[in-house]
Amino acid sequence: MKNNRLMKNLGKATVAAALLATGVSPVLAATENKTEVKSNKTAAESSSKKTSSPESSKASSSSEASKSSSSAASSSSKKAAKKSAKKSTKKAAKKSAKKSTKKAAKKSAKKSTKKAAKNTKKVAKKTTKKAAKATKKSTKKAAKDTKKAAKTTKKSTKKAAKDTKKAAKTTKKSTKKAAKDTKKAAKTAKKSTKKAAKNTKKAAKTTKKSTKKAAKKASAKSTSASSTSSAK
């Protein structure tokens, strides 16, 4: 019977420790143990009063022994419950703190990762947009420059062609004039040569005539001189 009560009290202490681990106050468990002890004591006293006189002293003695055992069991139960409750509280607090820290760290890491990913995405989007804008601007400028260069080249080519045509026309005109001048010069030279030849022929004829006349005159003079010499 004593063992049964002790086991019962120990069971209650274990329950109290379990209740403490789940958040129930250890004072409540201790109060329940005290109530159980008092209830057992009252039951023992009532039982001893109902027994006959011859057995009264025996029951009283048994009641006192039971009371003493109950007190010892109650004290042991209290001690065990207190120790168990303290251990369970410490263990539960440690476990709860570890769980809370782990959960908080996980939540913080998740939040930080999410925030970092969001910032990265935002920066990447902004950079891509900026690069696309710059590329578009550069392409537009390059197209404008190419168009301008093509226009300038076309203008230069047109001017060069015009200048070439003008130069060719001038050259043709100059060549034509030079040919005409050459032809004229040749005609003039031919005319001059013909005139010079005619003049030369005329001069030669005049010279021949003069020479003949002079010879005739010299001959006549010679004859006259001979005649005079003979007369003397």
Image (cartoon, grey):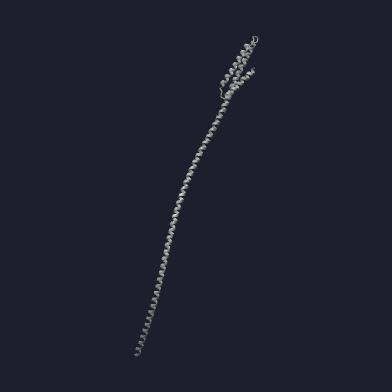
Q: Furthest residue to the bottom? A: 231
Front-most of 214 and 185?
A: 185
Q: Quadrant of residue 99?
A: top right
Rendering quarter of residue 25: top right
Q: How many marks?
A: 0
Q: Is residue 108 left or right of residue 205?
A: right
Residue 201 vertical position relative to residue 103 in the rendered view, above or below: below
Q: Residue furthest top?
A: 53
Q: Horizontally, is 175 left or right of 16 in the view?
A: left
Image coords of residue 51 (percent x, y): 64, 11
In percent of width and height, residue 55 lies at 65, 10
Residue furthest right in the image: 54
Percent of width and height locating residue 30? 57, 20
Q: Is residue 114 above or below residue 222?
A: above
In this rendered view, identify the residue nearer to me: 141 or 72: 141
Q: Image quarter for residue 69?
A: top right
Q: Quadrant of the C terminus?
A: bottom left
Percent coordinates x, y for residue 214 in the rendering: 37, 82
* Figure quadrant of the N terminus: top right
Instruction: Tell which of 90 and 99 is nearer to you.
Output: 99
